[in-house]
């Protein structure tokens, strides 16, 4: 009897597939918890992230990577997700890509890395450094949105296509949006290349350094609330 029921259910699913229905994860809006329900302190939010088991990624991680930097940073960098070094240390961008990012911050923005805030779309390492799935990204996104709400950066720099796409919901190719200055409600968004991409494609570094110069100009065009100038 149970077998017959299963066979009928399967037949029904095949029929729906033929009609054009696709099998997907839950829609992002159903997956997203509310950033508003999360605590209003970075420390408390960090503790929630440390204990988070809302998606598959939590099964494989060694450490969660919440983010670090100045809690009142003017500039916030958003990457895709932790790699192996980040997973073992619990700190964002500390591997080879991180070294390059740090150089870019210090050599072009002319401030120490500790002066900006650095976080990722997902807080746990995707196995084998694969791109986070849509459901993983949207499950984790409220943590990032809450970080943004608390830090209130004037400028957000998304690093690579995944960070841009999942922060904005815009699927435009990174080649089209890179270097643009996009005015969002509470901050200016500047998408640029991911430092890992720059390590593989050194010829793109010039463009990325150009983007960083745009950020520096923007920083200099407003009084800086963190350094009292
Ligand atoms: N790549 C990312 O996107 N984030 C990190 O923290 C490290 C590498």
Image (cartoon, rainbow, N blue to C red):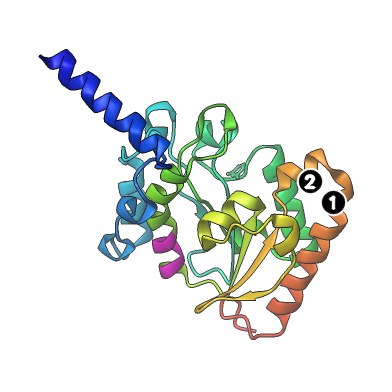
Q: Position of residue 100 (x, y in %)?
A: 75, 47
Q: CA distance from mark 1 to mark 2?
A: 6 Å
Query: Quick one: quadrant of the C terminus?
Result: bottom right
Magenta-span inclusion, residue 34 = no
| Residue ID at (53%, 71%) | 153
- With respect to residue 105, does 92 lie above or below? above
Lateral position of residue 51 relative to residue 186, left or right: left
Give the camera-side residue of 17 and 81. 17
Q: Which residue is mark 2?
A: 198
Badge 1 vs badge 2, beta-carbon distance below 8 Å: yes
Quadrant placement of the N terminus: top left
**Picture mark count:** 2
Residue in front for this viewpoint, 94 or 141 = 141
Where does the magenta region start and end?
145-149
First in residue order: circle 1 vs circle 2: 2
The circle drawn on residue 204 is 1
In-image side of 36 versus 179 (left or right): left
Q: Spot the residue most to the left.
A: 1
Q: Is residue 119 left or right of residue 195?
A: left
Secondary element under disc 1, as helix, strand or loop, is: helix
- Categorize mark 1 by other alpha carbons within 10 Å: few (<14), some (14-19), many (20+): some
Q: Main secondary structure of the magenta part?
A: helix
**Could you say which quadrant of the image residue 39 lies in?**
bottom left
């Amino acid at each position: 009897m149970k077998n017959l029921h299963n066979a009928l259910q399967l037949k029904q699913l095949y029929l729906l597939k033929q009609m054009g229905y696709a099998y997907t994860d839950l829609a992002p809006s159903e997956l997203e918890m509310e950033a508003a329900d999360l605590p209003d302190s970075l420390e408390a939010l960090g503790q929630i992230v440390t204990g988070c088991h809302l998606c598959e990624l939590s099964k494989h991680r060694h450490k969660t990577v919440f983010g670090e930097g100045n809690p009142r940073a003017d500039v916030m960098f958003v990457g895709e997700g932790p790699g192996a070094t980040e997973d073992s240390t619990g700190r964002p961008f500390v591997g080879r890509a991180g070294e390059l990012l740090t150089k870019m911050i210090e050599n072009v923005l002319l401030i120490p890395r500790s002066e900006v805030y650095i976080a990722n779309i997902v807080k746990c390492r995707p196995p084998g450094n694969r791109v986070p799935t849509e459901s993983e990204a949207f499950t984790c996104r409220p943590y990032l949105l809450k970080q943004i709400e608390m830090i209130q950066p004037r400028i957000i720099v998304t690093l690579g296509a995944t960070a841009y796409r999942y922060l904005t919901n815009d699927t435009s190719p990174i080649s089209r949006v890179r270097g643009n200055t996009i005015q969002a409600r509470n901050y200016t968004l500047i998408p640029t290349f991911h430092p890992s991409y720059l390590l593989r494609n050194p010829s793109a570094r010039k463009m990325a350094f150009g983007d960083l110069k745009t950020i520096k100009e923007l920083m200099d065009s407003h009084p800086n609330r963190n350094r009292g100038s």
